[in-house]
Amino acid sequence: MAAYETPRREDYAPITLDLILAKSIEEGDCWIWQGGCGHGTPHISENRRAVPVRRWIAQHHLAKNVAGMLATNSCGNPLCVSPDHVLVVTRARLQQLTVDRLRYHLNPARNAKLSAAARARSKFSPELIEQIRHAEGPQRAIARAFGVSFDTVNKIKAGKTYKTYGSPWQGLGARA
Ligand SMILES: [Zn+2]
């Protein structure tokens, strides 16, 4: 990281946007890098030093402050160096983007599972959950009365699955 902060010397062979475009193939709005890569991302050699291409574009073409930041892109193509797609983000933001992309591109099964779980949760309104939580009697009878499974009642009563949704009457003596 520190190496990237080193100021460029006057006698370095200059990198230009034209040079970067010449080493890429245009595909739609993307510039697909055909040059070398380091750590899986496009790098270009500047006086025998490998410089990340997107970082160079952010710093020198887009005039962004890249100190402590990472360069990535908005399209998610690992080889795209299009200046229109270059983004400068924090490490935390990049990790989130990477997680989102992996979920979207590589793991449709997990996606389906996550949204199914969200749908399953949403059929229990906060009111219903509160009612079940405060209902008295055997849990099997409560389950039948509310039309939910015994397991659901058990988890709501134990406070394991369903968070409290800030019900206005909570803590006002209902449990006394
Ligand atoms: Zn792109």
Image (cartoon, rainbow, N blue to C red):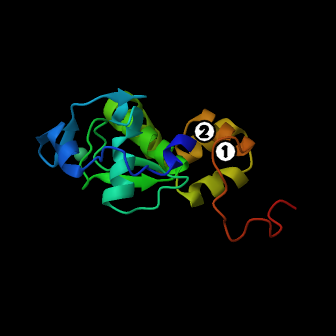
Q: Which is nearer the eye, 107 or 61?
A: 61
Q: Which mark is residue 119?
A: none
Q: Residue 131 is drawn in which quadrant?
A: bottom right
Q: Which mark is residue 156?
A: 1
Gap between marks 2 and 1, in whole Å? Answer: 6 Å
Q: Are marks 2 and 1 in contact (CB under 8 Å)?
A: yes
Q: Which mark is residue 152?
A: 2
Q: Amino acid at mark 1?
A: Ile
Q: Residues within 10 Å of mark 1 (few under 14, many from 20)?
A: some
The quarter of the picture where the N terminus appears is top right
Q: Position of residue 80 (x, y in %)?
A: 26, 41
**99 left or right of 158?**
left
Q: Which is nearer the eye, 52 or 140?
A: 52
Q: Quadrant of ligand 1?
A: top left
Q: Amino acid at mark 2?
A: Thr
Whether residue 73 is visible, yes or no, is no
